[in-house]
Image (spheres, rainbow, N blue to C red):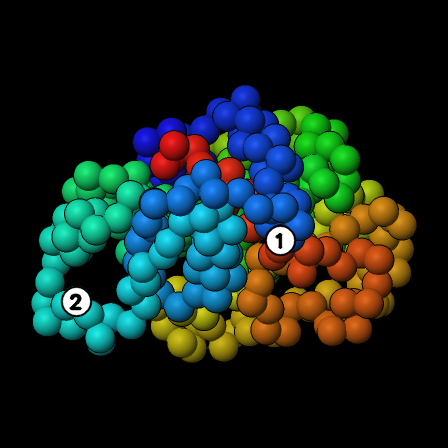
Amino acid sequence: MRHLISINDLDREDIRYILKKAEEFEDVARGEKRLKILEGKILGNLFFEPSTRTRMSFEVAMKRLGGEVINMTAQEASSVAKGETLADTIRVVSGYCDAIVIRHPLEGAARFAAENSSVPVINAGDGAGQHPTQTLLDLYTIQKECGRLDGISIALVGDLKYSRTIHSLIKALTLFDTKIYLVSPEALALPDEMLEEIDGNVQRAQLDEVIGNVDVVYVTRIQKERFPDEEEYRKVAGSYRITLNTIRNAREEMIIMHPLPRVDEVDPEVDSTRHAKYFQQAFYGVPVRMAILSEVML
């Protein structure tokens, strides 16, 4: 694997291979076992947008495997503030490290970075485009917590229009035998052009109609920063929320996932239920990113 830019770069067998490798790294991710397979390697973290889980889990993954990390997190403290182009930043940083992780507000920025890099580039989110490593950890979570990927019914709830997490995940889910329900306010519905690209068992639904049938409820935050008009955001802010009442008819084994951060989409009272898996989901990012780093660097 040279670069990881889009989930479309992977097929079903590629995904299964990465998830299997992640499983092998779980005890290392927990610190129960030590490995030095990336000793002498350096990862460059270029985050042009805020990040907590993605940036830190990449950093932990690299360090748990014996490697080192250099970070650029504040644009105002870098040459970007002086007007340096993205192409030049990538050319310079790729001379310092063995792989680059990039998050950028512009869709297509990660692929552009790959075209200008001499080392592997991993997309950690580009605008409303793709977030392939989040998708891989989401699939890993489903496989770990539900025991399978094929035969899963999943409700994707929330901002389906702007969420790059959803845009990546829905394409990956259709590589498996899955049933997908799209649950969102009309203003946040999955774009028609994306819906037309999907070849799978996908339909729009109301959550109360399907809550008793699904294995997974995947909730997303409304992407306020993606709205071109703040007034449009205000019209949909707070329009959905998962509460104890919402899930009262759910299957006992149903799990709730969320890429985090959450704002008010999931009531904190849900955290203590057997359904809440979003914090475990965040941990799974470490072994999955270990698997990805080892693939692009070794």
Mark closer to the chain start, 1 or 2? 1
Residue 187 seen from this side = no
Quadrant in which the C terminus appears: top left
Q: Position of residue 163 (x, y in %)?
A: 48, 55
Q: Position of residue 14 (x, y in %)?
A: 50, 25
Foreground residue among 193 and 26: 26
Q: Position of residue 194 (x, y in %)?
A: 45, 40
In the depicted structure, whether residue 173 falls above or below residue 244: above
For badge 2, the amino acid type reads Val
- How many marks the image carries: the answer is 2
Q: Quadrant of the N terminus?
A: top left
Observer-nearest residue: 51 or 131?
A: 51
Residue 31 disc label: 1
Q: Is residue 35 visible?
A: yes
* 16 relative to 56, above or below: above
Q: Amino acid at mark 1?
A: Gly
Residue 3 is tagged as none
Give 110 or 212, whichever is nearer the viewer.
110
- Residue assigned mark 2: 80
Q: CA distance from mark 1 to mark 2?
A: 36 Å
Left or right of residue 171, residue 145 in this image: right
Q: Which element carries disc 1, helix, strand or loop?
A: loop
- Residue at the image point whose x is 78% and y is 67% from the top: 270
Q: Looking at the image, is 70 positioned above or below residue 81?
A: above
Q: Give neighbour class at mark 2: few <14, some 14-19, many 20+ (Cα, 10 Å).
A: some
